[in-house]
Image (cartoon, coloured by chain):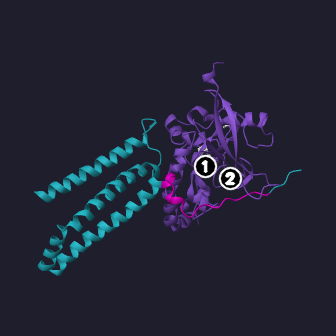
Amino acid sequence: MADRDRLTIELWILRYRPAQDEEPHFVSYTVTYTEEMSVLEALQSIKDEQDGSLSFRWSCRMAICGSCGMMIDGTPKLACSTFLRDLAPGPVKIAPLENFPIERDLVVTVADFVKKIESIYPFIMPKETKPVEAGEYLQTPAQMAAYEPFSDCINCMLCYAACPQFGANPDFIGPGAMALLQRYNGDSRDAGSRERLDLIHGEDGVWSCTAVGLCSEACPKLVDPANAVNQNKTNSAFDFFLRGLRKENHS
Amino acid sequence: MSERRPYVRRQSRLWWASRTYRGYTLRELSGVGVAVYGAVLLAGLDSVRRGPDAYAAFVGWLSTPVAIVLHLVLLAAMLLHGLTWFQTLPKTMPRLIVGGQAVPQKTITNAAIGLAMLCSLALVIGALS
Ligand code: SF4
Ligand code: FES
């Protein structure tokens, strides 16, 4: 390989090992890289060749599993689809996703986020279930277009790292879970909006959001979670004012 | 042996002042400009209620350097607020499907800005004629 193809770059990585570190601190590593090398590959080369104790999450290395989210120079990004050539000359600051507790090095706690996505009934609840023999639940392309981008979410949590309101209130349901909620509420085959709406009133629901909008910019899958949150403010408000009428209808 | 001791980073109180959130903070601050301009208009209306002398004084104040600078600042705030407001607009609506396809958010923003400009133009023309 020609010399000009073997470049080096310095990475400042925020490290935290719960057994020995009081608090996180930056450690500098220098890696040799090529044009096509991603931040994830750089981390793997550090783990292989310099320090085997460095911890980070990854799986697919093709921007589909959502495991490798981290702050790269202050912006939430997928390490596997961020390239060193775009970060040169460095040094590059790499830290765990903002707004989440750090488990170890670049690994953050995901338990609360998982609870949130479990809570919103993440499955289609048809009005009436029909037997398999009765055939599929049909949908037109237009009906699919109404929710389709929201189904592209890979649960990477970059949007949460971009959201200052989630930083201020960790109980805020947040952009990613709302995108998933809208994926089902916007689906013509689903009849579960009522149940889901009951979960998103108040400060821990949609009302922590002040339409900062950076969640949608951070999203690597163009899901537009800000749209999911903000259109549901209208739904939540309507529901608040029309609640009385609804109860009468039901009794 | 593994040990769990999750480390919680405190959010800075000044998060809104950081470069990342500058656009958002300016948008929110420009809302204050809109409110101040509303107050100026109300003061004008009130001067009409108080009679010809008060109204003349208000109009006189409008041409002082302070008032002119204030209005330029408020105009800038107004324009920024209008622009960012219309950029936020498509985020607050359900996805608009026309002919089986989603209308791009840019189109919605541009249509709303166009409509606002038409209304402003009609107002100005109305006031001048
Ligand atoms: S909405 Fe986008 S940024 Fe948020 S979790 Fe889903 S894919 Fe990631
Ligand atoms: S490793 Fe799967 S998204 Fe990056």
Q: Is residue B14 left or right of residue A81?
A: left
Q: Residue furthest top?
A: A1
Q: Does ligand 1 reach within 8 Å of label 1's beta carbon?
A: yes
Q: Amino acid type of disc 1? A: Gly
Q: Which residue is mark 2?
A: A113
Give whichever of discs 2 and 1 has the lower sequence position. 2
- Seen from this angle, which residue lies furthest right? B1
Hue used for the chain lettered B: cyan
Q: Secondary structure at mark 1?
A: helix
Residue A75 placement (x, y as % from top left): 57, 46
Spot the residue most to the left: B129
Q: Residue at x 63, y 19 (%)?
A: A2
Q: Which residues are magenta?
A: B5-21
Image position of A133 with respect to B16: above or below: above
User: Which corner quadrant of the figure contains ligand 2?
Assistant: top right
Between B5 and A233, the residue placed more toward the observer is B5
The amino acid marked with disc number 2 is: Phe
Q: Which residue is mark 1?
A: A176
Q: Is residue A188 left or right of residue A33?
A: left
Disc 2: residue Cβ within 8 A of ligand 1's nearest atom: no
Q: Position of residue A101 (x, y in %)?
A: 70, 56
Q: Quadrant of residue A246?
A: bottom right
Vertical arrangement, residue A228 with respect to residue A8, above or below: below
* Quarter where residue A223 is shown: top right
Instruction: Categorize mark 1 by other alpha carbons within 10 Å: few (<14), some (14-19), many (20+).
Output: many
Shade representing chain A:
purple
Q: Is residue A29 visible?
A: yes
